[in-house]
Amino acid sequence: MKHKNYIYVLAWAFTILIAWWIIPSLVKKMTDAPNGYPLMYYSARIKDLCIIDFRNVKDSFQDAHGNVYPRSQYDSLLPILNARQLMMEGTMPDSIDGHAMDMKEMRVKQVMFRYRPTDMQTTQPPMGVLLEAMPKRGKLSLPGDYFRLTDRIVFVDAETNAVNEEKTIRFNEELIKKGFVFPAKGFWGNPSTRKAYEEGYFCLDSKNCLFHMKMVNGRPFIKNTHVSDSLQVRWFVMNEAADKRHYGFVFGTRGEAGIIEEHEGGYNFRRMDIRPVDLEKDQISVLGNLLYWTVTLTNDDGMDSYGLDREALNRLASYHQERKRVLWDEVSEWIFPCYLSFSDTNNDFVGFYWEKGAWKAFVLQFILAVGVCLVNTFVYHRHRSWVEALCVFVCGIPAIIAWILLPDWRK
């Protein structure tokens, strides 16, 4: 009899676990709806953020203060974004805010960057490829080897898998000489030949110091950026700008976000004047031109967009939009205090993810628990029905499913 009770307890637990996933998934499929955000862009004409949403024909173009503009003014109010169209029409202004509108310069100063939480959570390759930063024929090419950076740096021939001892010793000695402390915590680069120039890798040592490493004329170039003197680095993304203003985007453990730029032969952290960034939840996009940057952060709660001055990255305008509530939001907070999912919007890996609901669901679960207690007492004549009632109160609808599917438990 005791073994039978154990089996039913396990059956209950398994049924509840499966129902915690199946029931919310079915309800979500029936009640959820996609939730997108409009394109945001800072206008050099009206000096404000503009909302561009051509999914909705009515009021598709307006500024952050709610002023609606006709579609015919869209190109002229965003002249840098629509420069090619305006030049074809012959209506492109010669200058804006004292800056000459030259197409070549606009292309060089253009910045496009996007970050998603999955970028950081995806397993990084354990090796890198260090290209020659000053190729003799002016064209980037693969070096024929790759490196590992853990408790030391090791260069391995790509064809024979043999360690290049000479190159390994040379780089290790230079890293140690410049103050790099092994083991390395991380390294970031852009190992591609489809770019204008090569800036190597930015490496984080065991003392959280960020170093710049590249290969110049076959010799190691190692420098401590000293960015870590004012910022505890958590993540870096190489984004070699066409105008060579910055090396990439860096993020701190306290939500700081900005760029590492060259400054008087050294390095400078230029922080973007935006709210703190949560790398586990926020998607980040940067659209920059020769005058302004538009930075947009989106997550499950809403969107925050900022217009920044290009030089100082100071905030000129901001806009917040709450996520539109759908039927799923209204239903789930009343029936699911929590539920199980095997996928997550901010993660590409399959796993067990517990999603939080709202305390309102315990109202329904209390009513269900009382009902179970009454049915067990007066219909099935079980006087110790509080165990099942307590389980229903804690677990909710999944426990009701188990209670219905396993009637022998009440005998």
Image (tube, rainbow, N blue to C red):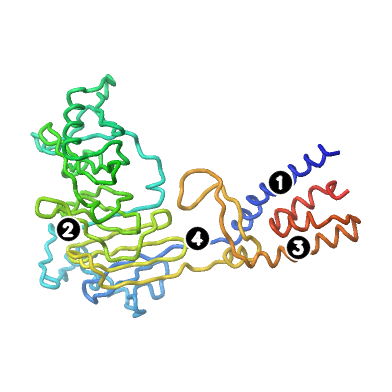
> Badge 4 local density, few (<14 within 10 Å), some, or many (20+)?
few
- Report the amino acid beneath label 3: Leu
Q: Which residue is mark 2?
A: 109
Residue at the spot 80% in from the left edge and 47% down from the top edge: 406
Q: Which numbered disc flags the more N-terminal residue, 1 or 4?
A: 1
Q: Is residue 259 left or right of residue 244?
A: right
Q: Quadrant of residue 132?
A: top left
Picture layout, residue 102 above or below residue 192: below
* Residue beneath the point at 10% across and 67% down: 100
Task: Find numbered disc 2 in the image and state the secondary structure of the residue it sits on.
Answer: loop
Dot 2, crowdedness within 10 Å: few (<14), some or many (≥20)? some
Q: Are marks 2 and 1 in contact (CB under 8 Å)?
A: no
Question: Residue 368's mark?
Answer: 3
Tell me: 65 left or right of 107: right
Give the x, y percent position of residue 316.
Answer: 25, 72
Marks 3 and 2, the one that precedes in the sequence: 2
In the depicted structure, whether residue 192 falls above or below residue 286? above
Mark 1 lies on residue? 13
Up-down relation of residue 187 to residue 82 (above or below): above
- The quarter of the displayed image where residue 295 is located: bottom left
**Tag 1, which secondary structure?**
helix
